[in-house]
């Protein structure tokens, strides 16, 4: 799986490395990180909820966060 993840991330890395202006590159790296993290955590929470898991269970699966935080992930926050 790590190899496939690395391969999937390569176009993003290529794009980020192509930005010559350091501040713009930094800003794009930060935005990519926030977007990927938020979107994927939301998708995971919603998938688990769709599988019938309770928010407390989802929180446990997502590293032991509270059910409130798991619910926030589900809302994309």
Image: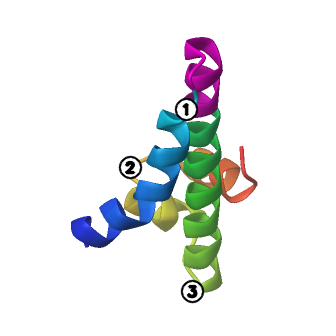
- Give residue 38's position: percent from left, percent from top: 63, 48
Q: In terms of secondary structure, where does tag 1 sit?
A: helix
Q: Which residue is mark 3?
A: 51
Q: Residue at x 58, y 50 (%)?
A: 36
Badge 3 marks a residue whose secondary structure is: loop
Residue 29 magenta-drawn? Answer: yes
- What residue is drawn where x is 55% and y is 48%? 37
Residue in the image at 58% along x and 30% along y: 19
Q: Secondary structure at mark 2?
A: loop
Look at discs 1 and 3 and give the one toward the viewer.
1
Choose top left, top right, bottom left or bottom right for residue 42: bottom right
Identify the residue position indicated by label 1 in the image.
29
Write down the quadrant of residue 44 in the picture.
bottom right
Foreground residue, 40 or 51? 40
Mark nearer the N terminus (1 vs 2): 1
**Mark 1 to mark 2: distance in Å?**
27 Å
Q: CA distance from mark 3 to mark 2?
A: 19 Å
What sort of colour scheme is used for the picture?
Answer: rainbow
Tell me the quadrant of the picture where the N terminus can be found: bottom left
For marks 3 and 2 on the same chain, the one whose residue lies earlier in the sequence:
3
- Secondary structure mostly seen in the magenta stretch: helix
Name the residue carrying label 2: 64
- Residue 16 in the image: state x and y as whole percent: 53, 37
Residue range of the region highlighted in magenta in the rendering? 20-30
Disc 2: CA contacts within 10 A as few (<14), some (14-19) or many (>=20): few
Q: Position of residue 59 (x, y in %)?
A: 48, 56
The outermost residue toward the right is 75
């Amino acid at each position: 799986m790590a190899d496939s993840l690395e391969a999937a991330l390569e176009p993003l890395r290529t794009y980020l490395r192509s930005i010559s202006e350091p501040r713009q590159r930094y800003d794009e790296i930060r935005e990519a990180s926030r977007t990927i993290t938020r979107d994927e955590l939301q998708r995971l929470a919603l998938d688990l909820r769709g599988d019938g898991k309770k928010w407390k269970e989802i929180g446990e699966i997502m590293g032991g966060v509270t059910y409130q935080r798991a619910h926030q992930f589900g809302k994309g926050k």
